[in-house]
Structure formats: C-alpha cells, structure tokens
Image (tube, rainbow, N blue to C red):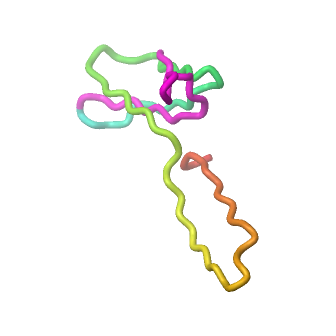
Amino acid sequence: RGTVRAGAALSPLADARVTLIDAAGNVVATATTGEDGAYAFTDLDAGEYSVVATGYPPVAGAVTVTGTGIDGHDVELSHPGE
C-alpha cells in the first residue's frame, strides 16, 4: 500500500494508475488511486516487485483552423479498458 503524490507541494494524486510488476517483468496487478492518492495490493507472494505509477496515457487529435478560427477542441482522458 502507498500514496501517489505529485506537484511541488506533493499533494495526493487521485485517479493515477499504479502497476505492480514481478521480477520476471510480468504485470501482477493494477490499481487506481482514490481521492486521497492511496492504492493497495493484496495477496502477494514473497519476492521482489516494481511499482510503476502513471497519469493518463497521452491522447492526440487533429485540429483544423480556418480563417474564422475554431470554436473549441475537447480532449477526453481515460485509462485503457475503462
């Protein structure tokens, strides 16, 4: 268990993706942090693990600007599979 923090103030980061990887490089589990930045993994075998925390995967989209400009361009971020 732990807390993901970000920014200069090290504030808890909600909705971060945390991945647990075993010594062989296999993904054992994933978790998404709560509002308090907390995550936890349970029922683990003894051994060495790596913990990788990330925000949202990048999203790209095309925008065309004409002589009159554009009204807006919304971007939706989500974790894969959600």
Q: Residue 19 location, x and y as percent?
A: 43, 33
Which residue reaches farthest right? 71
Which residue reaches farthest bottom? 67
Residue displayed at 37% across by 36% down: 27
Residue displayed at 39% across by 31% down: 28
Q: Nearer the viewer, residue 7 or 31?
A: 7
Task: Indicate whether residue 19 is drawn in magenta.
Answer: yes
Residue displayed at 65% across by 54% down: 76
Q: Residue 15 location, x and y as percent?
A: 59, 34
Q: Residue 37 location, x and y as percent?
A: 57, 23
Q: Is residue 38 left or right of residue 51?
A: right
Q: Residue 69 location, x and y as percent?
A: 70, 77
Q: Nearer the viewer, residue 25 or 37?
A: 37
User: Measured along the vertical axis of the image, is residue 38 above or below residue 57?
Assistant: above
User: Measured along the vertical axis of the image, is residue 73 above or below residue 20?
Assistant: below
Q: Specify start and end residues of the magenta stretch as a single range.
A: 1-23
Residue displayed at 64% across by 79% down: 65
Quarter of the view holding residue 22: top left
User: Measured along the vertical axis of the image, is residue 77 above or below residue 68?
Assistant: above
